Amino acid sequence: MIYLDYSANTPADSRVLERFCEVERSCPGNANSRHQAGRDAKRVIDHATQTIAGLLSAQPAEVIYTSGASEANNFALKGLAKLSRHLGRHIISTPLEHSSVSGTLTALQEQGYEIDLVDIRRDGTIDLEHLKELLRPDTIAVAVTLVDSELGVVQPVKEISEILQAWPNCHLHVDATQAVGKIPVSFEGVETMSLTAHKFYGLNGIGLLLKRRRGGAAAPHASSWRSSLSSTAAKAPPSTAAAPLQWLWRPLSRRL
């Protein structure tokens, strides 16, 4: 069989599998423990987190580990809605989003949030003028996919971010699942960003949510979330996500 459906799932790189086994064998401790084995496990997680943050122009405290991009999308949008509910209940998105985004928005709509979908131009990108028309004082979020999984269209995230600078209460969520490892991806100008390792030769079951720190404060839910993922069983996945990111970034940078 010739497997070509890499937009859905990539096979795990042999080096990723080797790294996973290596970490599981050499770091048996719980990263929350204070003994040597626990400190060793925490060191592995911290190193992976610093590597990932550096590659994505983020800070280590802005990296939250999840089970995948779907959970990261769900977590980000519901979190933003809850934290901003006193400012408004209006959210803008597109008709091109993954079901983990559209499904979450439908759930929020049933809770009283108003959802508007921005028009799509003939080339597949969103209509920025229509976006400007949809924005209003009670708009709390814009959710957009950076690269479409079927069409391959790259959305103008930088331009969207610049538009939203005039709307300080509106947060930008970017689903970068199909973009990482294929085009340059930056966290600059974005409030939350989701991705998952199995799209770039990593393991299934390890995703990332980047959550912007505001005013020097850590994400309000990051600490509790990461602590739940610092157990013995979770220390290897961050390392296996960092490794393929590094391998892909080097040739991508040279190619560009």
Image (cartoon, rainbow, N blue to C red):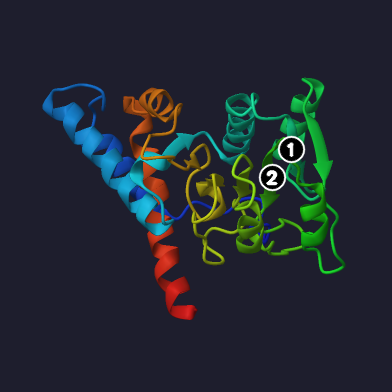
- Residue in front for this viewpoint, 196 or 158: 158
Residue at 60% over, 62% down: 158
Labels 1 & 2 near each other (Cβ < 8 A): yes
Tag 2 secondary structure: strand
With respect to residue 34, does 185 lie above or below? below
Q: Position of residue 220 (x, y in %)?
A: 44, 27
Q: Is residue 83 left or right of residue 40?
A: right
Q: Position of residue 169 (x, y in %)?
A: 61, 39
User: Can you identify the residue that label 2 sits on?
Assistant: 142
Return the residue nearer the eye: 228 or 23. 228
| Figure check: 240 above or below 80 | below
Residue 152 seen from this side: yes
Tell me if residue 248 comes above or below residue 146 in the rendering: below
Q: Nearer the viewer, residue 59 or 149?
A: 59
Mark 1 sits on what residue?
A: 91
Mark 2 residue crowding within 10 angstroms, few (<14) / some (14–19) / many (20+): many
Give the label on residue 120, or none: none
Residue 238 placement (x, y as % from top left)? 38, 42
- Left or right placement of residue 233 versus residue 37 in this view: right
Examine the image and state in which quarter residue 80 appears: top right
Where is residue 107, by image quadrant? Answer: top right
Comes first in the chain, label 1 or label 2: 1
Residue extending farthest left = 36
Q: The disc labelled 2 sits on which kind of residue?
A: Val
> Which residue is depicted at the point 55% across and 38% down?
68
What is the x, y in percent for residue 144?
Answer: 69, 50
Q: Residues within 10 Å of mark 1 (few under 14, many from 20)?
A: many
Q: Residue at x 76, y 58 (%)?
A: 150
Q: Please state, as top left, top right, bottom left or bottom right, where the N terminus lies in the image.
A: bottom right
Q: Amino acid at mark 1?
A: Ile
